[in-house]
Image: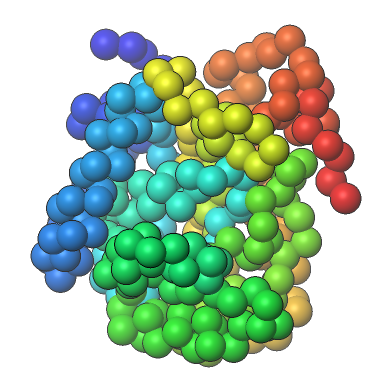
Amino acid sequence: MKVRAGWQKHGSWYWVRPGFRPTALNKAENREIFYNQIVIRLMKTMLRFQGIQMSVAGSENLPDTGGALLALNHTGYFDFIFGGTAANLHGRRLVRFMAKKEVFDVPVVGALMRKMKHIPVDRSAGAGTSALDAAVTSLRAGNLVGIFPEATISRSFEIKDIKTGAARIAKEAGVPLIPVVLWGSQRVWTKGHKKRLGRHHFPVWVQVGEPLALTGVVEDDTAKLRETMKIMLDRLRSEYETEYGPFPGGEYWRPAALGGGAPALE
């Protein structure tokens, strides 16, 4: 079996940090047959077929039960899949993602999204009050909710300015706000580039941070969230570069700061 410094194999697919301890199944969420037993299994089968090397750290920062808001960086179209892996590791919990309303307007797809209790966001409606209220309701019901506070994919693969919605929702719902960073997802499929869904064996990493200590001042908490996500992403990318680099340079999926070909952060 392959040996990686700082990682150990868990099951047939995941790589985790040494000392990882599985937690008990979340029985209520595990009983959701469609999402947990069918969709999750299909997604994992697809990713295994692609040879995705999935490394997840910090899943112990998620609660065993009850609500929490996961704030994720946005680098590619599969972020909602990779962003749920830490919860899957942690008692097979589920994440209800906030996603643009247009996805829910697609026949069949919209019905499936609603069945999984994801939350539509109408970006044309300004602050999207109805979506924020729906997220608060879901969190108070004990769900994990995922939000991409940058709102759109970052073409630079840096952390863009983020919206205040995450801090507002966490404050209103009275739940932990947990930063999560992804790296490698953009190699599979991102904005402006072709899908690479074949068996490419791309490594994708997920890091879950500790819940933020919130002040209740939305603007301050938003700034703290962005700074925390930037620090986490810099560390994750540095370790990724060490393990898989050096890279020649100019790669579309690497940021300009690392010698890649992605556009600079605007």
Q: Quadrant of residue 168?
A: bottom right
Residue at (63% x, 22% y) in the render: 241
State whether residue 122 is above or below residue 197.
Answer: below
Residue 154 visible at all = yes
Residue 125: percent from the left, percent from the top? 66, 83
State whether residue 237 is above or below residue 244.
Answer: below
Q: Quadrant of residue 54?
A: top left
User: How was the colour assigned to the protein in this rendering?
Assistant: rainbow
Residue 178: percent from the left, percent from the top? 51, 64
Residue at the farthest front position: 107
Q: Quadrant of the N terminus?
A: top left
Residue at (61% x, 83% y) in the render: 128
Q: Nearer the viewer, residue 138 or 17?
A: 138
Residue 232 visible at all = no
State whether residue 230 is above or below residue 175.
Answer: above
| Left or right: where 77 falls relative to 266 | left
Residue at (46% x, 69% y) in the render: 105
Residue 114: percent from the left, percent from the top? 33, 71
Residue 48: percent from the left, percent from the top? 30, 28
State whether residue 27 is above or below residue 229.
Answer: below
Q: Nearer the viewer, residue 114 or 248?
A: 114
The number of discs equals: 0
| Left or right: where 265 falls relative to 10 | right
Residue at (73% x, 58% y) in the render: 227
